[in-house]
Amino acid sequence: MTTVTLSTKYQIVIPKEIRELFNLHAGQKLVALPWDGRIVLVPVPAAGELQGFVPGIDTEVVREEDRV
């Protein structure tokens, strides 16, 4: 378990071993969620990483004649 300190600017530093474990990089977005009395940080994947994450989904969009 690793302890971090909240700065006077309400910032924390994510320890190196956690950054490496989750492959986090400077500038990467994280979502902060309150959960059961805790703060959970969830990495937001880049758009390119989402390609193909729902295999077999029908992506065809039927359009009305006047909306082509």
Image (cartoon, rainbow, N blue to C red):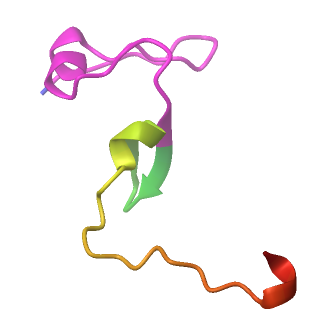
Instruction: Let me know if residue 3 is in the magenta part.
Output: yes
Q: Which residues are magenta?
A: 2-31
Q: Is residue 27 visible?
A: yes
The answer to whether residue 18 is above or below residue 54 is: above
Left or right of 27: which side holds 25?
left
Left or right of 56: which side holds 62?
right
Q: Residue at x 47, y 41 (%)?
A: 47
The answer to whether residue 2 is above or below residue 54 is: above
Residue 15 point in image, percent of width and height:
26, 13
Q: Nearer the viewer, residue 52 or 38?
A: 52
Q: Is residue 44 visible?
A: no
Q: Main secondary structure of the magenta part?
A: loop
The answer to whether residue 52 is above or below residue 66 is: above
* Residue placed furthest toward the right: 66
Residue 60 point in image, percent of width and height:
50, 77
Q: How many marks?
A: 0
Residue 64 point in image, percent of width and height:
77, 89
Q: Nearer the viewer, residue 57 or 6?
A: 57
Instruction: Let me know if residue 28 is in the magenta part.
Output: yes
Residue 28 point in image, percent of width and height:
46, 23
* Residue 57 position by quadrant: bottom left
The answer to whether residue 57 is above or below residue 52 is: below
Q: Residue at x 36, y 15 (%)?
A: 25
Q: Nearer the viewer, residue 44 or 16?
A: 44
Q: Residue at x 50, y 16 (%)?
A: 27
* Residue placed furthest toward the bottom: 64
**Quadrant placement of the C terminus:** bottom right
